[in-house]
Image (spheres, grey):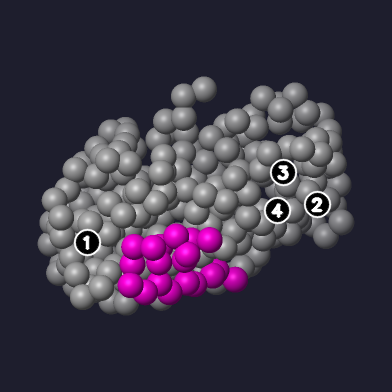
Amino acid sequence: MEHTSEHIEDEIQTRVRLYDYSTGKQTFFQWLAGILPACADKDVLELGAGNGKIWRDLLARWPGCNLTLTDISEEVLASARAQLEPVADLTGGLTFEAVDFNRLPYQDQSFDIVLANHNLYYAQDVNRVIADIHRVLRPGGMLICSTIGADHLGELAMLLRQYHQDLPWGSERWADRFGLDNGAQLLMQAFAHVDQYEYDNNLHVNSVEPVIAYLMKTMKGLLAPWVREHLDVIRPALESRMSEKGYIRLTPHSGFFIAYKAE
């Protein structure tokens, strides 16, 4: 299977739909936006912008910023463009560019802020991408990057491993590359200071379908053949777990870092 940006975006969006069952009062992006410092008139680059959903919560706090939103897929960028061009007047400029973040085409010290949400663990070489982000930031600039812990939605992994003890789990794989446990250490190799924030939240999912949809998409769809083959046991297991309390409790262990470039 070719692992395109569309596969990654599908996985992210099915995870986002699980967040609709959050017990918290804020979505992840609302929480993140509320913690970030208010910024105005900055030059901002987003890597792997996807559908641009974070800007619904950020634009009010970052008025007049010049936004460069990038993704490797033109199709995904078209979705972001459709969502954000109606509010382009809140920005100082809005640009969409097809860019592979493994090879940033920008000159040194081009941006004040770089965002990378739930995607640095897809980098071909995480250390090299972090160094390249540092290069394009101006002195005193910030990298804001979200990620997950190895136990993200771990309750599902435990349930499935009753039927396949060695079943690979995406959260463990991605967090090993760039996660909440090792991300600060990786960032400190390039940046002067790193702050870490973790999202304290649970999901109470009272429907089997969004869980199955996530399982079909996670790890860029690599689990899908096994899930389809074992739906006759997976679905009843999920339904049985839900019948105990009326929902399945999931822990979406996630958070973000702010890494500061020296002045």
**Among the two numbered marks 2 and 4 on one chain, the one whose residue lies closer to the N terminus:** 4
**Mark-to-mark CA distance, 4 and 3:** 16 Å
Task: State which quadrant residue 91 falls in.
Answer: bottom left
Q: Which residues are magenta?
A: 182-200
Q: Which of marks 4 and 1 precedes in the sequence?
A: 1
Lower position in the chain sequence, tag 2 or tag 1:
1
In this rendering, would 14 be left or right of 161?
left
How far is mark 3 from mark 2, CA to CA?
8 Å
Residue 137's mark? 1
| Amino acid residing under circle 1 | Leu
In depth, the one of 108 and 213 nearer the eye is 108
**Disc 1 or disc 3, which is closer to the eye?**
1
Which residue is identified by label 4? 154
**Sequence-earlier tag: 1 or 3:** 1
- Check residue 208 in the rendering and tell me which mark sits there, or answer none: 3
Q: In this view, which residue lies farthest toward the front? A: 189
Residue 258 visible? The answer is no
The amino acid sitting under disc 3 is Val
Q: In what element is the residue under mark 2?
A: helix
The disc placed on residue 242 is: 2
Between tags 4 and 3, which lies in front?
A: 4
